[in-house]
Image: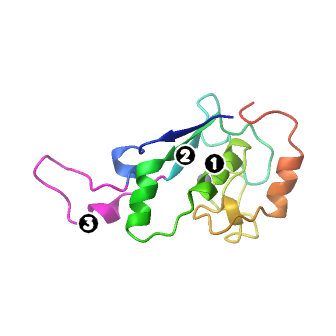
Amino acid sequence: MFIQAAWQDSPINDLDPNFISPTIIPPCARHEEGAFLGRTLNLNAIPGVFVHNTNLVQGGEYAFIYKETIQEAINIGIPIVESLIVAHEIGHQFGLGHGDVLTPGGLIPKFPNTGLMHPNIPTNLIIPRHKNLLRSREQAPGH
Ligand SMILES: [Zn+2]
């Protein structure tokens, strides 16, 4: 397991306005891009299947926590707790998905009340399904 504090993600995921050219700035650029506050990766896994909603899978190899993006989100009034982002990414390193339809394994019936692993991280709650996956793990995350 490896967690790295980083400055920000790619230009379209950093919460900064994007530039089409050096002189043209889209007026709604801030609304057109996403913002990754943290991201977990596993370059040795089949893309998208190192986290899963219902099965025990490999998990992530490492995660980044994007310090500047977090601060900018706080500055525009988005309530963010950095420690919850770190805990959420650790959950991904243990192979936990978000519980939504975009994560392999299908929708967890409890979604959107999936607590810590919900994409918006509304609480520090770890739902029973995720606890069961964590408790049944026999190998270190990323393996
Ligand atoms: Zn996530």
Q: Is residue 28 magenta?
A: yes
Q: Position of residue 43 (x, y in %)?
A: 58, 30
Q: How far apart are the two marked residues, 3 and 1, measured between alpha carbons?
A: 29 Å
Observer-side mark, 3 or 1, equals: 1
For badge 1, the amino acid type reads Glu
Q: Which residues are magenta?
A: 15-36
What residue did someone put label 2 on?
A: 39
- Find residue 77 and report its image quarter: bottom left
Which of the two discs, 2 and 1, labels the residue nearer the N terminus? 2
Q: Is residue 37 magenta?
A: no
In the displayed structure, 7 sits above or below 71; it is: above
Judging depth in this view, the residue of 4 and 115 nearest the camera is 4
Horizontal side, residue 106 vs residue 19: left or right: right
For badge 2, the amino acid type reads Arg
Residue with the most extreme top position: 44
What residue did someone put label 1 on?
A: 89
What residue did someone put label 3 on?
A: 28
Q: How many numbered discs, if any?
A: 3
Q: Position of residue 135 (x, y in %)?
A: 88, 48
Observer-side mark, 3 or 2, equals: 2
Question: At numbered mark 2, what does the secondary structure look like: helix, strand or loop?
Answer: strand
* Cβ of mark 1 under 8 A from ligand 1: yes
Residue 64 visible, this orientation: yes
Question: At numbered mark 1, what does the secondary structure look like: helix, strand or loop?
Answer: helix
Q: How far apart are the two marked residues, 2 and 1, measured between alpha carbons?
A: 7 Å
* Cβ of mark 2 under 8 A from ligand 1: yes
